[in-house]
Protein backbone atom coordinates (compact mmCIF):
# COMPACT_ATOMS: atom_id res chain seq x y z
CA UNK A 1 0.00 0.00 0.00
CA UNK A 2 2.78 2.43 0.88
CA UNK A 3 4.47 1.95 -2.53
CA UNK A 4 1.23 2.70 -4.34
CA UNK A 5 0.68 5.90 -2.33
CA UNK A 6 4.24 7.06 -3.07
CA UNK A 7 3.43 7.04 -6.81
CA UNK A 8 0.63 9.60 -6.44
CA UNK A 9 1.74 13.17 -6.99
CA UNK A 10 -0.31 16.17 -6.03
CA UNK A 11 -1.99 17.82 -8.99
CA UNK A 12 -4.56 20.61 -8.95
CA UNK A 13 -7.05 20.13 -11.77
CA UNK A 14 -9.65 22.76 -12.66
CA UNK A 15 -13.15 21.23 -12.86
CA UNK A 16 -15.29 23.33 -15.18
CA UNK A 17 -19.04 22.95 -15.46
CA UNK A 18 -20.65 23.19 -18.90
CA UNK A 19 -24.25 22.83 -19.97
CA UNK A 20 -23.03 20.75 -22.95
CA UNK A 21 -19.80 18.89 -22.23
CA UNK A 22 -19.70 17.27 -25.67
CA UNK A 23 -19.75 20.66 -27.40
CA UNK A 24 -17.20 22.02 -24.91
CA UNK A 25 -14.81 19.09 -25.53
CA UNK A 26 -14.97 19.70 -29.27
CA UNK A 27 -14.63 23.48 -28.97
CA UNK A 28 -11.74 23.43 -26.48
CA UNK A 29 -9.85 21.08 -28.79
CA UNK A 30 -10.44 23.27 -31.84
CA UNK A 31 -9.96 26.69 -30.23
CA UNK A 32 -7.45 26.17 -27.42
CA UNK A 33 -5.63 23.00 -28.57
CA UNK A 34 -6.66 20.67 -25.76
CA UNK A 35 -6.63 16.91 -26.39
CA UNK A 36 -9.59 14.84 -25.25
CA UNK A 37 -8.78 12.02 -22.84
CA UNK A 38 -12.20 10.98 -21.48
CA UNK A 39 -15.85 11.46 -22.47
CA UNK A 40 -18.23 9.33 -20.43
CA UNK A 41 -21.83 9.47 -19.22
CA UNK A 42 -22.47 9.87 -15.49
CA UNK A 43 -25.07 8.04 -13.41
CA UNK A 44 -26.99 11.32 -12.96
CA UNK A 45 -27.53 11.66 -16.72
CA UNK A 46 -24.74 14.15 -17.35
CA UNK A 47 -21.37 13.83 -19.01
CA UNK A 48 -17.85 13.84 -17.54
CA UNK A 49 -14.90 14.88 -19.70
CA UNK A 50 -11.16 15.14 -19.25
CA UNK A 51 -8.66 16.93 -21.46
CA UNK A 52 -5.00 17.85 -21.43
CA UNK A 53 -2.75 20.47 -22.94
CA UNK A 54 0.92 19.50 -22.90
CA UNK A 55 0.23 17.05 -20.05
CA UNK A 56 -1.69 19.56 -17.91
CA UNK A 57 -5.25 18.51 -17.14
CA UNK A 58 -8.75 19.92 -16.90
CA UNK A 59 -12.01 18.14 -16.12
CA UNK A 60 -15.43 19.06 -17.46
CA UNK A 61 -18.76 18.31 -15.90
CA UNK A 62 -22.36 18.34 -17.00
CA UNK A 63 -24.51 17.40 -14.08
CA UNK A 64 -28.23 18.03 -14.35
CA UNK A 65 -29.58 19.59 -11.17
CA UNK A 66 -26.11 20.46 -9.86
CA UNK A 67 -25.52 23.68 -7.96
CA UNK A 68 -22.49 24.26 -10.18
CA UNK A 69 -23.64 26.60 -12.92
CA UNK A 70 -22.00 28.18 -15.90
CA UNK A 71 -21.67 31.92 -16.07
CA UNK A 72 -22.78 33.92 -19.08
CA UNK A 73 -20.64 36.71 -20.45
CA UNK A 74 -22.86 39.33 -18.84
CA UNK A 75 -22.44 37.93 -15.33
CA UNK A 76 -19.43 38.35 -13.01
CA UNK A 77 -17.25 35.28 -12.55
CA UNK A 78 -15.58 34.00 -9.41
CA UNK A 79 -12.61 32.37 -11.09
CA UNK A 80 -10.58 32.16 -14.28
CA UNK A 81 -8.23 29.57 -15.73
CA UNK A 82 -4.60 30.69 -16.18
CA UNK A 83 -2.35 28.76 -18.58
CA UNK A 84 1.35 29.18 -19.29
CA UNK A 85 2.33 28.10 -22.80
CA UNK A 86 5.23 28.44 -25.23
CA UNK A 87 3.74 30.65 -27.99
CA UNK A 88 0.93 32.90 -26.86
CA UNK A 89 0.67 34.72 -30.20
CA UNK A 90 0.11 31.53 -32.21
CA UNK A 91 -2.38 30.34 -29.57
CA UNK A 92 -4.22 33.67 -29.78
CA UNK A 93 -4.56 33.37 -33.56
CA UNK A 94 -5.90 29.82 -33.25
CA UNK A 95 -8.44 30.82 -30.58
CA UNK A 96 -9.60 33.89 -32.51
CA UNK A 97 -9.99 31.89 -35.74
CA UNK A 98 -12.11 29.32 -33.85
CA UNK A 99 -14.46 32.03 -32.57
CA UNK A 100 -13.23 32.60 -29.02
CA UNK A 101 -14.46 35.91 -27.60
CA UNK A 102 -11.28 37.88 -27.03
CA UNK A 103 -11.38 40.02 -23.89
CA UNK A 104 -7.81 41.27 -24.17
CA UNK A 105 -5.44 41.00 -27.17
CA UNK A 106 -1.86 39.83 -26.55
CA UNK A 107 0.24 42.35 -24.69
CA UNK A 108 3.54 42.39 -22.85
CA UNK A 109 3.05 42.50 -19.08
CA UNK A 110 5.53 42.15 -16.19
CA UNK A 111 4.71 38.42 -15.86
CA UNK A 112 4.89 37.68 -19.61
CA UNK A 113 3.06 38.11 -22.90
CA UNK A 114 -0.61 37.45 -22.24
CA UNK A 115 -4.12 37.52 -23.68
CA UNK A 116 -7.59 36.86 -22.29
CA UNK A 117 -10.50 35.04 -23.90
CA UNK A 118 -13.83 33.42 -23.10
CA UNK A 119 -14.90 29.97 -24.21
CA UNK A 120 -18.20 28.97 -25.79
CA UNK A 121 -20.06 29.27 -22.45
CA UNK A 122 -18.32 32.40 -21.18
CA UNK A 123 -15.65 30.92 -18.88
CA UNK A 124 -12.64 33.25 -18.59
CA UNK A 125 -9.23 31.97 -19.72
CA UNK A 126 -5.83 33.70 -19.61
CA UNK A 127 -2.94 32.42 -21.73
CA UNK A 128 0.59 33.66 -21.10
CA UNK A 129 4.12 33.03 -22.29
CA UNK A 130 6.40 33.81 -19.32
CA UNK A 131 9.23 36.28 -19.85
CA UNK A 132 12.59 34.88 -20.88
CA UNK A 133 15.35 34.73 -18.36
Image (cartoon, helix red, strand yellow):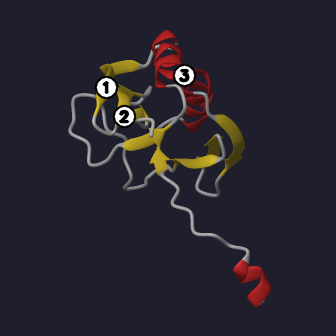
Q: Secondary structure at mark 1?
A: strand
Q: Secondary structure at mark 2?
A: strand
Q: Residue at x 61, y 28 (%)?
A: 33
Q: How many marks?
A: 3
Which residue occupies the foreground of this view, 113 or 34?
113
Q: Which mark is residue 31?
A: 3
Q: Quick check: marks 1 and 2 in contact, CB under 8 Å?
A: yes
Q: Residue at x 48, y 52 (%)?
A: 14
Which residue occupies the foreground of this view, 82 or 107?
107
Q: Position of residue 124 (x, y in %)?
A: 35, 35
Q: Residue at x 48, y 40 (%)?
A: 84
Quick check: can you spot residue 18? no
Q: Which residue is mark 1?
A: 108
How far apart marks 2 and 3 lie (CA) works out to 21 Å
Q: Position of residue 21 (x, y in %)?
A: 56, 38
Q: Residues within 10 Å of mark 3 (few under 14, many from 20)?
A: many
Where 113 sits versus 9, above or below?
above
Quick check: can you spot residue 52? yes
How far apart marks 1 and 3 lie (CA) works out to 22 Å
Where 15 sits versus 103, above or below?
below
- The disc, 2 or 3, on the residue closer to the chain's N-terminal end is 3
Q: Quadrant of the C terminus?
A: top left
Q: Quick check: marks 2 and 3 in contact, CB under 8 Å?
A: no
How far apart marks 1 and 2 lie (CA) works out to 6 Å
Q: Which residue is mark 2?
A: 112
Amino acid sequence: METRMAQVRTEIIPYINYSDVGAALDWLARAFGFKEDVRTPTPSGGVHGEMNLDGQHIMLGQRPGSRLTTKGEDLPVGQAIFVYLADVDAHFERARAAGAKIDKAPEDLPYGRSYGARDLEGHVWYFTTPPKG
